[in-house]
Amino acid sequence: MKISVLTRLLDLISPRACIVCGRRLTVSDDAICSACNLHLPRTGYQSDTVGNAMAQVFWGSIKLERAAALFYYEPHAGTSRIIHAMKYGNRPDVAMAMGRMAAAEYLPCGFFEGIDTIVPVPLSRRRERQRGYNQSEWIARGIAGATGIALETAAVRRTQFKGSQTTLNRWERQENVKDLFEPADGGHLAGRHVLLVDDITTTGATLIACAKAMAGIKGLRCSIMTLGFAKS
């Protein structure tokens, strides 16, 4: 990656810190330092995008072409600091940087082949106003920028916010997101292969509900990509 003179100057004036360990980033680092990047607990799911543990979460609920996450998520670990910064730390830049990183690692294995459109899981209007942005959209922007695949933010909308999923169990999460999404302006996606993007997969309830909301679009095929996957 070519580093511009302006980028180097800005980095001297306002040094950036690694979102995981807090150490100063070099000009070639993006969001996390090289040491934390090296120790990121990657899933390796790009080698099996159909039968991996994350894909199995969706078996029997929705039909998927492929599914993968960049890293394993654990509460109170380094990966949780990445997710927390994106969701609650006013850091859409971190979300975009991690999206670029994930896309760069998954491009060589052909994960994005045949995908026509990237659709981020939407937030409710109230939650997006509170946060100021949708972290899933910024992850998707990073992926779109790295792959050249079109980004679509109007295909599905969230009808309401029913509260955080954080403290809910698997069955409570499914009930909490029931009828939470509805198709908006997705007719032009007929016959296309869509990549649903979110920050983390836990029970998969939110992603399943979002995919089901688009299920009525004729000929639509769906894949899923998240940054984190929380193993049960």
Image: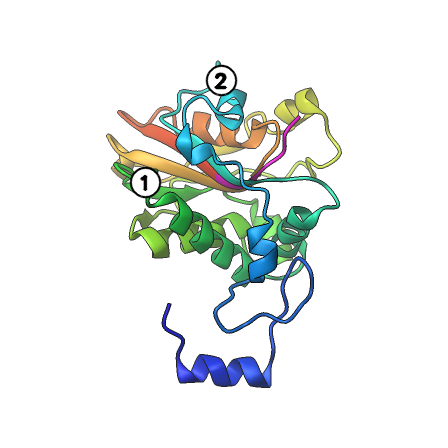
Q: Which range of residues does the magenta coloring cover?
A: 226-232
Q: Is residue 148 magenta?
A: no
Q: Secondary structure at mark 1?
A: loop
The nearer-to-camera label among 1 and 2 is: 1
Give amino acid for label 2. Ser
Q: Residues within 10 Å of mark 2 (few under 14, many from 20)?
A: some
Q: Secondary structure at mark 2?
A: loop
- Give how far across and how far down residue 88 sits, in percent: 67, 55
Residue 61 vs 189, above or below: the answer is above
Can you name the residue that lies furthest to the top here? 60
Taking the spot 63% from the left edge, 52% from the top edge, the residue there is 82
- Give how far across and how far down residue 146 sits, in percent: 35, 55
Residue 85 vs 15, above or below: the answer is above
What is the quadrant of residue 63 in the picture? top left
What is the quadrant of residue 142 in the picture? bottom left
Q: Which label belongs to residue 61?
A: 2
Residue toward you, 149 or 40: 40
Q: Residues within 10 Å of mark 1 (few under 14, many from 20)?
A: some
Residue toward you, 4 or 151: 4
Residue 132 in view (yes/no): no
Whole-angstrom CA distance, mark 1 to mark 2, is 23 Å
Taking the spot 33% from the left edge, 37% from the top edge, the residue there is 186
Taking the spot 48% from the left edge, 36% from the top edge, the residue there is 44
Residue toward you, 123 or 16: 16
- Give how far across and how far down residue 160 sits, in percent: 59, 39
Give amino acid for label 1. Phe
Give the residue pinned by disc 1. Answer: 112
